[in-house]
Image (cartoon, rainbow, N blue to C red):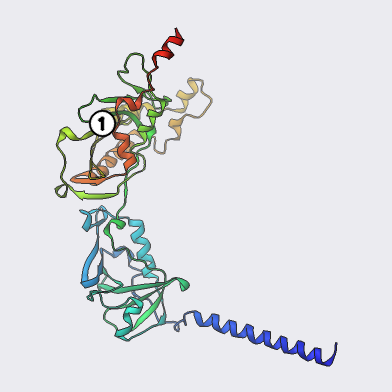
């Protein structure tokens, strides 16, 4: 290698090193400068007292209350939605993120620049952030939550009584729509529990589908017309109450309910004595329903007793396979009856005095006529071929 080539190589190497150092400096410049240890948390004291919180209020522009979450004996509820149960998992996730929101970096203390971070006072008409008010601690806690810094998994915040704003650890995206804070699970009764389905359209003959035993493979259509067969797919109607989620919820007083003669009626009875009654209707492109639940104690006790199979009974029957009854989580009929009563209580606490907007497919499962549960009638040509 010539002396000239060696100098060129050394020059290129030096340039490369300078480029790497510059890149590192630029990269580090993009990271928040962590405050010295001891800068603390956005809401000090919250971490050790999460279970003491009794209410969370979310306020938006012009100091308007957008969402009110209140904790009562039965759990959290959303006041703007007739006190319907809140999604406690979502709420707890937010509170944990809030409790762990360490202060990472000081930001502006200039009032005129608050809007850039979304941390201006929510009294402002154009406020971009929200104010959280947490009650139940020794002192009320307030925090303005602004924009999210996704690059650093952090959020801009400011305590309303202070001028200093901060970049705090954790992503806090606060929903302002009370609907998004609801526990939307309405019922989750698997089709395997359904013993009988009764459906009635306005002015039409009622349908009744039933099983004699849970292990039956298909539902029988009662009063089947002569020469007609049931469509096996009709058994899918038993899944109506499985994974049924609400779209919205209203107090009865806020909804105009059609006359009884214009309502769909559906009834679902389970093998263990639970009955769900539904009245449903279609209005302006949305599907609405009212629900009620009750328990038949005699049917429940009879079913629970029939499921109790002792090992000796299984052996006497010559059955070498394990019985499903033996795998029941709680084989004590008394405790299981208590669980059924609690299930009815919980359902009616959700149902009572309310109207629900429900998904179109679940409504469609209730809006069925005889034509929907029967196989197509054989044509005259088909009949002739059979003869």
Q: Nearer the viewer, residue 115 or 311?
A: 115
The quarter of the displayed image where residue 101 is located: bottom left
The residue furthest front is 381
Q: Residue at x 30, y 49 (%)?
A: 247
Q: Residue at x 37, y 68 (%)?
A: 172
Q: Residues within 10 Å of mark 1 (few under 14, many from 20)?
A: some
Q: Position of residue 195 (x, y in %)?
A: 33, 28
Q: Residue at x 18, y 34 (%)?
A: 262
The residue furthest right is 1
How many labels sit on residues?
Answer: 1
Q: Is residue 244 above or below residue 210?
A: below
Q: Is residue 163 visible?
A: no
The residue under label 1 is 297
Q: Residue at x 21, y 45 (%)?
A: 355
Q: Nearer the viewer, residue 382 or 240?
A: 382
Q: Position of residue 43 (x, y in %)?
A: 33, 74
The quarter of the displayed image where residue 25 is located: bottom right
Q: Is residue 199 visible?
A: yes
Q: Is residue 366 above or below residue 122?
A: above
Secondary structure type for disc 1: helix
Q: Is residue 171 above or below residue 373?
A: below
Q: Position of residue 378 (x, y in %)?
A: 40, 17
Q: Is residue 269 left or right of residue 217?
A: left
Q: Quadrant of the N terminus?
A: bottom right
Q: Quadrant of the C terminus?
A: top left
């Amino acid at each position: 290698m010539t002396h000239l080539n060696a100098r060129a190589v050394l020059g290129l190497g030096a340039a490369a090193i300078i480029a790497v150092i510059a890149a590192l400096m630029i990269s580090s410049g993009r990271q928040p400068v962590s405050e010295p240890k001891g800068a603390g948390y956005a809401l000090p004291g919250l971490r050790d007292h999460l279970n003491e919180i009794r209410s969370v209020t979310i306020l938006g522009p012009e100091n308007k209350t957008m969402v009110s979450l209140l904790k009562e004996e039965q759990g959290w509820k959303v006041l703007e939605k007739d006190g319907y149960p809140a999604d406690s998992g979502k709420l707890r996730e937010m509170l944990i993120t809030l409790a762990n929101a360490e202060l990472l970096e000081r930001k502006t203390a200039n009032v005129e620049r608050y809007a850039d971070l979304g941390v201006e006072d929510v009294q402002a008409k154009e406020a971009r952030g929200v104010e959280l008010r947490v009650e139940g601690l020794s002192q009320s806690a307030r925090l303005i939550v602004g924009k999210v810094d996704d690059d650093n998994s952090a959020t801009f915040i400011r305590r309303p009584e202070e001028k200093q704003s901060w970049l705090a650890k954790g992503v806090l995206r606060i929903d302002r729509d009370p609907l998004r804070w609801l526990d939307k699970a309405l019922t989750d009764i698997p089709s395997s529990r359904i013993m009988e389905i009764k459906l009635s359209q306005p002015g039409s003959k009622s349908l009744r589908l039933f099983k004699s035993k849970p292990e039956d493979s298909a539902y029988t259509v009662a009063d089947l017309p002569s020469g007609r067969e049931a469509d096996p797919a009709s058994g899918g109607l038993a899944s109506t109450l499985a994974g049924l989620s609400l779209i919205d919820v209203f107090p009865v007083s806020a909804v105009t309910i059609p006359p009884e003669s214009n309502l769909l009626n559906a009834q679902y009875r389970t093998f263990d004595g639970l009955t769900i009654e539904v009245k449903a209707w279609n209005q302006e492109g949305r599907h609405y329903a009212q629900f009620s639940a009750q328990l038949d104690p005699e049917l429940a006790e009879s079913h629970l007793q029939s499921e109790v199979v002792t090992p000796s009974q299984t052996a006497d029957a010559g059955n070498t396979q394990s019985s499903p009854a033996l795998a029941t989580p709680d084989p004590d009929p008394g405790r299981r009856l208590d669980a059924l009563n609690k299930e009815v209580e919980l359902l009616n606490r959700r149902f009572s005095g309310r109207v629900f907007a429900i998904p179109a497919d679940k409504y469609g499962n209730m809006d069925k006529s005889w034509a929907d549960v029967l196989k197509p009638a054989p044509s005259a040509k088909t009949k002739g071929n059979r003869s």
